[in-house]
Amino acid sequence: MAGAEAIVAAVVASLILSCAAFTEENPTDRRVLVLLEDLAIESTHSLFFKSLSDRGYELDLKLSTDPKLALQRYGEYLYDALVIFSPSVEKLGGSLTSEAVLDFVDSGHDLILAANSTTSQFIRNLAAECGVEFEEDFDSVVIDHLSFDDARDAKDHSLLATKSLIKSKVILGAKEIQAPILYRGIGHVVSPANSLAIKVLTASSSAYSANPNAVLASPPALTGTSIGLVSVVQARNNARILISGSLDMFSDNFINSPVRITGSTERFDKSGNQEFVDELSKWVFHERGHLKAVNLQHHKVGESGEPSMYRITDHLEFSLEIYEWTGKNWQPYQADDVQVEFYMMSPYVLKTLNHNGKGKYETSFQVPDVYGVFQFKVDYKRLGYTTLDLSKQIPVRPSRHNEYERFIKAAYPYYGGAFSMMAGFFVFGIAFLYHK
């Protein structure tokens, strides 16, 4: 009896958790598992965790080596997002293997991964699977002799103070970050062929990656703006990943620290780290940049019902509604670059949709003079926004024999040829019979 009660309690708990989870109507993550290398990180990074809690996130902070760790139970995921603040861990506890973490992302869930100079091969491999490759030399950090914090650097110029941020309001918010970002950690590269990964924070042109305690015997492998410091990845299933080469960047020490870039007289009482990590976490956890499309409709001009098929050369109207999630509600999305394709093997019609400022996008066009099975396709991909990939199939047939006009203009030459042959035959018959 006690065992049955335990099972019922577990099922009820699972249902309660699923009600608070990421849903289509509320796409913001709520349940977040945070894996810490040391419980002291909870206090040294308290401002970042407090910011998440204040925004309504349910944080479950655990040691990364906890033998009871699990991401799912009874086939249901227990969390909407995963934060790994365990750079040097060689293996996660419980059932959390690298495959389990990647399956978690493949299921549409989000991930924040932070590294530092002690990053293990396990974390490096996990980042590489997400499209970001850390510096291969385990002793290397990013060094910049021209853009470092003049007041707090340890004389090796590895405490960077940089403002090389991506220009994207959807990823970093509408308000520009004024103060430099403090960063101490390792660099990474993103393959140019990887269209899913975006470098959000990069090193300056004078930076390089090397061991600060050793003399350079050869040119460094990573130099200049090719060094990524913080990158984000948006998978094809719209799962979002944040990969940072610095765990200290999230710390209270870096957030509250004053900044003065070397060679500059400008001094900032507080770094831009708090605003930077807050805005990035809003994007990663789908508080911003999440789109949805509803009410995809099409019909003949002058009608309201959706037909089962179209005839060639019919005139039709196409419409849909697009909304953007603000973290609290859905607002009409406004853009002038949403397009629809009328597609069969290749696009026969490509039209830019007009919007009314209230979320509705529409256009009209003529069905091409080609019959077959077509699709209305909307494939909308823009930097920082979730992908809209919609399609609706519709057959197009030629007109039946009794649906054409009685006389077709294109056939007038043939009509003339037939009647002229008849008239000529009549004249020839008369001439043949009665002319001597």
Image (cartoon, helix red, strand yellow):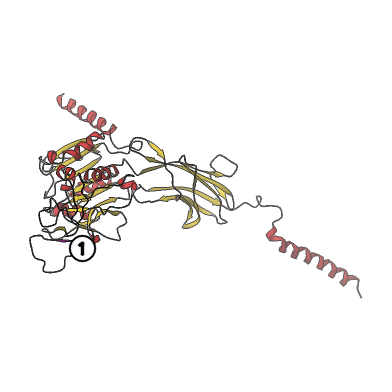
Name the one closer to the observer, 407 or 356.
356
> Can see residue 172?
yes
Question: Which percent across, then down, holds residue 379?
Answer: 41, 51
> Can see residue 78?
no
Question: Which percent across, then down, holds residue 296?
Answer: 47, 42
Residue at 18% from the left image edge and 54% from the top image edge: 160
Which amino acid is tagged 1? Thr
Residue at 25% from the left image edge and 30% from the top image edge: 16
Magenta span: predominant SS is loop
Mark 1: few/some/many CA within 10 Å (<14, 14-19, 20+): many
Residue under label 1, please give it.
Answer: 223
Q: Is residue 303 left or right of residue 249?
A: right
Name the one closer to the observer, 358 or 172.
172
Question: Which percent across, then down, holds residue 71?
Answer: 20, 40
Provide the residue span drawn in magenta.
Answer: 204-217
- Give the answer, above or below, for where 158 lies relative to 302: below
Name the one closer to the observer, 85 or 396.
85
Question: Which percent across, then down, holds residue 332?
Answer: 43, 40
Q: Is residue 128 left or right of residue 167?
A: left
Q: Secondary structure at mark 1?
A: loop
- Considering every residue shown, the one lying at the far front of the view is 265
- Give the answer, above or below, for where 6 lies relative to 276: above
